[in-house]
Image: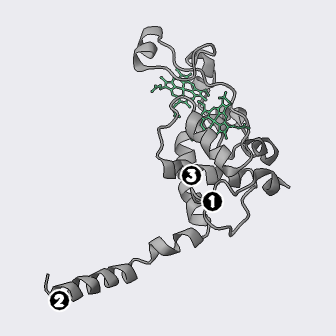
Amino acid sequence: MTLAATVLLVTIAMVVAVSNPGSSAESAAPVESQLERGQAVYAFSCTTCHGATGQGFDEARAAFPADHYDCTRCHGPLNPPVMSVEMIAQTQTVFSLGNAPALADGEALSKYGSAAGLYAYVRATMPRWDPGRLDDDAYLDVTAFVLHLAGLLPEGAPELTHEGLVAFDLAAAAD
Ligand code: HEC
Ligand code: HEC
């Protein structure tokens, strides 16, 4: 490569770096925009069982129309939490819903130890009928939103990052 070409490439790289400051500033971004993303994930994947404000199954159920109010008519309570399409077709019933607990409860959530424990639980088991359907960043955002519902995330806190999960002590935050 000629010297002129090298200089040109370096210059382009610098311009790109300067015009895209997002990557370096990301860890210090305030949590509010993450909570907006997390709320959207929650509304799509969690509200139907835990309720829009995280009060638990009764809140969720109350939002359904009257003809759907009797959930167990279709969601057989003795069915497994996850059912294949074939199993649904065969039994003409769908997965059990369980009794989704309130998430707006900092004391209850502190049993997961750290935000890493909560994230790992949610990623491995939720949404209960199709665990693992979200990508890692969506699980991170919804974990932040759950912490917010539980009052464990102070306003103006920095965004939750994958690296920062372990150091986020839930018992200390609940105090
Ligand atoms: C089909 C209903 C259903 C959906 C949808 C669902 N959950 Fe759950 N969730 C439950 C039930 C039931 C439990 C109690 C444990 C169990 O039976 O698996 C639970 C437990 C939890 C817990 C543990 C609470 C505690 O106090 O220990 C968390 C956190 C949680 N869910 C978060 C989520 C998130 C976040 C989503 C969306 C990504 C979600 N759940 C979607 C039914 C659901
Ligand atoms: C008339 C039958 C019927 C009734 C009643 C019913 N459901 Fe469902 N539900 C279904 C079917 C069918 C699916 C889709 C299953 C699939 O795609 O695998 C479903 C899917 C779901 C899902 C997963 C998709 C999502 O939107 O998150 C949840 C959670 C759920 N139902 C909650 C409830 C709750 C809570 C009630 C009671 C308030 C209820 N359902 C009442 C038939 C029913």
Mark-to-mark CA distance, 1 and 3: 11 Å
Tell which quarter ligand 1 is in. Answer: top right
x, y percent for residue 139: 54, 47
Residue shown at the point (50%, 37%) measured from the top left: 132
Residue holding disc 2: 3
- Helix, strand or loop at label 1? It is loop
**Mark positioned earlier in the residue sequence (1 or 3):** 3
Q: Nearer the viewer, residue 98 or 144?
A: 144
x, y percent for residue 102: 73, 39
Please name which of the two marks, 1 or 3, marks the residue nearer to the observer. 1
- The amino acid type found where label 2 is placed reads Leu
Is the residue marked by circle 2 packed among few (<14), some (14-19), or many (20+) residues within 10 Å?
few
Q: Nearer the viewer, residue 90 or 14?
A: 14
Residue holding disc 3: 140
Q: Nearer the viewer, residue 70 or 129?
A: 129
Please name which of the two marks, 2 or 1, marks the residue nearer to the observer. 2
Mark-to-mark CA distance, 3 and 2: 45 Å
Residue holding disc 1: 164
Residue 31, quarter of picture? bottom right
Is the residue marked by circle 1 packed among few (<14), some (14-19), or many (20+) residues within 10 Å?
few
Q: Is residue 168 above or below residue 112?
A: below
x, y percent for residue 37: 53, 56
